[in-house]
Each structure stands twice: as C-alpha cells, then as structure tokens.
Amino acid sequence: MKKILYTLLFLFSFSNVSFAANCAIDLEANGMMQFSTSAIAIDSSCRKFTINLKNTGTLDVNLAGHNVVISKKADFNYLTSIVNPSNGLDNGYLPEDKKVIYKTKFLGPNETISLVLDTNKFAKGEEYIFWCSFLGHWGVMNGSLTLS
Ligand SMILES: [Cu+2]
C-alpha cells in the first residue's frame, strides 16, 4: 500500500512539473553580440514572468554593455531612432518614453539582472520584440516576444 502511495505521489509530482508553466527564462548576452535565444514565449497563465539576464561578454560596459528593452515590434524603428548615449548607461541610452514597456540598465561583464514582467501589460496576438539598446547592437541583438 505504501509503495502504491509513493508511486502515486511520484507520478503526481512529475505531472505537476510537466504541466506547470515556466514563468522565467535565463537569457545570456555574449561577447559576440548574441542573445542566447531568439524567441521568448510567455505562457498567459503566468502572472509575472522573469527574465534573468546575464552579460557573459568581457568588454567593459562603456564599450559593449548589454541590456534588454521590451517594446511592441511596431515601435522598434521609432525607439531605436531615439537611442542616445546622453541618456546614460543606467537608462539604456533611452529617454523616458511610453513606448518602452520595460528596459534594464546596461550590464558589464558577468553582471546579472532580473527583470520581472507583469504579464497584464501584454496582449495575445500582439508582436513584441526584446532588444539590446547599446549602439550598434540591436540590429542583431533582438528577438520576438509573445504572449501565448
Ligand atoms: Cu548589447
């Protein structure tokens, strides 16, 4: 009887793992100006979704910092046009703008930051983009973000 119970408990915990939505992702930004993934899909059952960003590159933050900015894909061209270093490293070179849904500061080598997203700010069917707002980076450092 105990054996059956343990087996059931095991199966139950196993099924829990396989059905539970994963509400976080580890995202690496490397010295080759690459993100470790090109697509982030947020499960709509997640109330919060955490992006754990790590800069695995070796260049100083002033030379090649990495961050994550999240916006609608339709706003990408506009937002990249207002990137200006005068806005500072801590602001991701971006001024205050409502079209920026989320952004982090720039990270230097081996630095990490956790960005917690409120999934209510995203709509199903809308195309979002995550990108690095360091000068010259966003052309290759970008990926799709969707709520599904
Ligand atoms: Cu970058």
Image: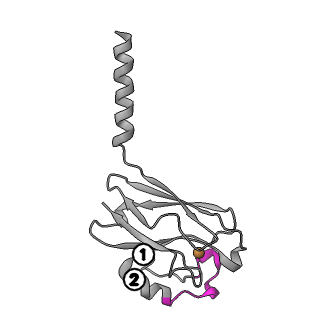
| Residue found farthest to the left | 125
The response on whether ligand 1 sits within 8 Å of label 2 is: no
Q: Nearer the viewer, residue 74 or 89?
A: 74
Task: Indicate the quadrant where residue 48 lies.
Answer: bottom left
Q: Position of residue 130 (x, y in %)?
A: 46, 71
**113 in relation to 23, above or below:** below
User: Is 145 included in the stretch rendered in magenta?
Assistant: no
User: Three-letter amino acid code at disc 1?
Assistant: Ser
Q: Nearer the viewer, residue 79 or 36?
A: 36
Give the residue number, with chain letter if any, for mark 1: 71
For this view, does 20 lie left or right of residue 104? left
Task: Give the extent of the magenta segment.
Answer: 81-93
For this view, does 26 lie left or right of residue 30? left
Q: How far is disc 2 from disc 1 in space, using C-alphas?
A: 6 Å
**46 in relation to 144, above or below:** above
Q: Quadrant of ligand 1?
A: bottom right
Task: Indicate the quadrant where residue 34 lies.
Answer: bottom right
* Rendered-image quadrant of the N terminus: top left
At a point 64% along the width and 88% down the height, the residue shown is 86
Q: Secondary structure at mark 1?
A: strand
User: Three-letter amino acid code at disc 2?
Assistant: Asp
Give the residue number, with chain letter if any, for mark 2: 75
At a point 59% along the width and 80% down the height, the residue shown is 134
Q: How is the image coloured?
A: one colour
- Characterize the local packing of mark 1: few (<14), some (14-19) or many (20 or more) Cα atoms within 10 angstroms: many
